Amino acid sequence: KAYVKFKNLKTEELYCTYGKNADETDCKPPPAGAATDDRYDPSVLTKCVCTAGTECATTIGDAGVASVASTILVRIAMGTLLERFGPSNVQSGLMVFGAIWVAASAGISAPWNYTLIRFFIGAVGAAFVTNQFWCSLMFAPNVVGTANATAGGWGNLGGGVTQIFMSLILFQPFVDSGMEADAAWRVSMLVPAVMFLICAACIKLLCWDTPTRRRYSVAETGKTQGASMWDYVEVLKDVRVLVMIMQYG
């Protein structure tokens, strides 16, 4: 059923050899005198590996854009959130939010909800901002650069390790144990969701915002006023900030 509407956008080939039923739940049976008795064209599905020109590739591309968009939006808001609520609260909240949508991804059934879930999961990418902010609070000036670089580097490494973990440590063993591939990848998504929740609980219950205080206050960084979105306007007045934004982008 998932492939009834599938069409290669480049070749115009359809999975349903003779088109789909009016209710779009299955392919039409072969008409009398048809050249082939097969209502399905499996050769088209081999192109659903998301090569260029397929609807699959378009969907994944759109989802990728949605994921990056949410990351950008949340990263912009993170400065104010971190100063107002502190890194441990923000990071644990972000982890819980991510856990909800990672678990929800186990129920993906259509391109639209795949894209929507990727959008919300993308927000967790803003955890990098908390990482750098928190390191700056926790480490002395003579080592904070090394701490930031090390934490950021290991964080980026995690993205690659996750690809290996999800496929070799979770998905493949589930398949080898007799589980259908479609069920195996869905169950696999529940594991990182649980890990997110465990991580969130540990951060909330065990972590301090600074070496001397359990909860952060803007006064510790020399600010006399509370956090505000207007701070971004003030920051953008500095041309050096604009150069760094362009460089990082």
Image: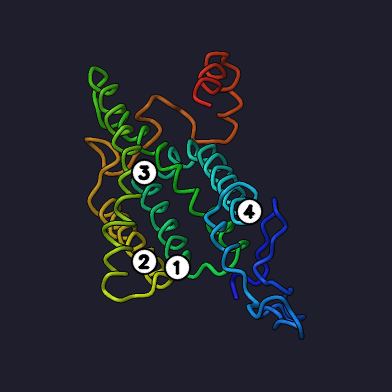
Q: Which residue is mark 2?
A: 190
**Colour scheme of the rendered structure:** rainbow
Instruction: Tell which circle, 4 or 1, labels the residue nearer the N-terminal end.
Output: 4
Q: Is residue 201 left or right of 73 when viewed as pictured?
A: left
4 and 1 marks in contact (CB < 8 Å): no
Instruction: Tell which circle, 2 or 3, labels the residue nearer the N-terminal end.
Output: 3
Q: Which residue is mark 1?
A: 106
Q: Secondary structure at mark 3?
A: helix
Q: Quarter holding the N terminus? A: bottom right
Instruction: Tell which circle, 2 or 1, labels the residue nearer the N-terminal end.
Output: 1
Q: Amino acid at mark 2?
A: Leu
List x then y, in percent, for residue 132: 36, 32
Q: Is residue 242 above or below residue 203?
A: above
Q: Nearer the viewer, residue 170 or 229?
A: 170
Q: Which residue is mark 4?
A: 54
Q: Amino acid at mark 4?
A: Thr
Q: Which residue is mark 3?
A: 159
Residue at image x 49%, y 24%?
248
Instruction: Report crowding for label 4: few under 14, some 14 to 19, many 20 or more residues within 10 A (C-alpha).
Output: many
Q: Is residue 201 above or below residue 21?
A: above
